[in-house]
Amino acid sequence: MIIEFLALTFGLHILLVNLAIGLSTVIPLMKRAGEKSGNDELILTSRKLMKFYAATYGLGGVLGTAFTVFLLSFYPGFIGLAGNIAFVPFAISILLICLHFISIVVYWYGWDRLSKNTHFLVGLCMMTSAILIPLGFRAIFGFLNAPIGLELQPKLHLNTIQALMNPTFLVLYPKSIFASYTLTFFILSAFLSKNKELSIKFAKYGLVTLLITVLLGVAYAETLRVISPYKFANALGFIFSMHAEYNISWLFIFKIIFVVIQFIAAILYLRSRKSLAAKVAGVSAMISVVSGELLNALSQYPMLVANVSGLPSNVVKQLENILNMAKPNPLTTMNSLYAITLAFLIPLLICFALLMYMVSKD
């Protein structure tokens, strides 16, 4: 049940975060293009998208908080250690989240109130902050792949500069951004299918960013093979007949199937102009993004840090219990805790579905 709770809240959070990155880029650029070309339809469309974005952004934050609470409840020792070691990357992302929230508010309420140039500058701030928010979190993910930058003296701490030079981070971060754009472009292609010209343009953008994402995905897999072979073997070592301690290669195959479906559906849409193909590409993009994130997170099970081979044995032994996902907080074995969690989580998911339906319908 622990992994299921974490996977559910994390998956939904990731879906909304990826949409947030893409929409925060598309909205100000679309509005600006409409203003320069005198195309009122582009401006109107960007306003509708902003309404959707403003309505759902907070929900992504709620789900992120729920995930953090679950993680804190199940693995308090790890959160305490990670919070201490990775304070700087966390702080960077939190500050950017605050800046992003402020820019969303100003951009929304500044519509038709601020000058066009000022409003566009606020939009650029919204776009840039959204792109940079994952920087700190992906640095932490890179650390979980391999603790590059961890220094033991004078006390256990993280050298942020070295952590940002982690080869897995250097590939994972841009891969994440392009995956966000791919998801957003295919979703918008389906959502705006009545406007064929705009919908087709987004489908073309999606194909380009999907190709870039796939290439970066191959590069990321190679860095894992070299730096974190345990994680690589669990995720897709079957290709090289590698022994896996926790084989979840089925999830990799599942993801690849939906990546292929995206390619095929998008190409079919460009050829046939049938909206069903665009919808298939959009849904497939959502599934592949969520499954890819879960694959990345779960392929290091049972350890929260996939490769600790570079650390002294006494430090590894000291951290063994803290980093072991198979050894959660003993209090979380109580069935009553799961009953209470479900009692609060189910209404949240119902509200999530209802809000998504209402803002999409509008």
Image (spheres, rainbow, N blue to C red):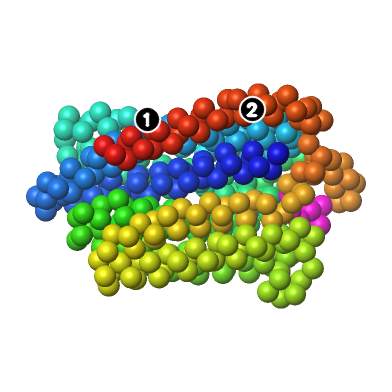
Question: Residue 203 sits in which quadrant?
Answer: bottom left
**218 or 70: nearer the eye?**
70
Q: On screen, 184 above or below 255?
A: above
- On residue 341, which mark appears? 2
- On residue 102, which mark appears? 1
Q: On screen, 271 above or below 7?
A: below
Q: On screen, 171 above or below 318?
A: below
Q: Residue visible at 31% across and 55% down?
A: 190
In percent of width and height, residue 192 lies at 26, 52
Secondary structure at badge 1 equals helix
In percent of width and height, residue 278 lies at 33, 60
Secondary structure at badge 2 equals helix
**288 or 321: nearer the eye?**
288
Left/right placement of residue 303 relative to residue 38 reads: right
User: What's the residue type where badge 1 is placed?
Assistant: Ile
In percent of width and height, residue 51 lies at 29, 36
Left/right placement of residue 166 relative to residue 333 reads: left
In percent of width and height, residue 132 lies at 46, 46
Q: Residue visible at 48% across and 65% down?
A: 259
- On residue 302, which mark appears? none
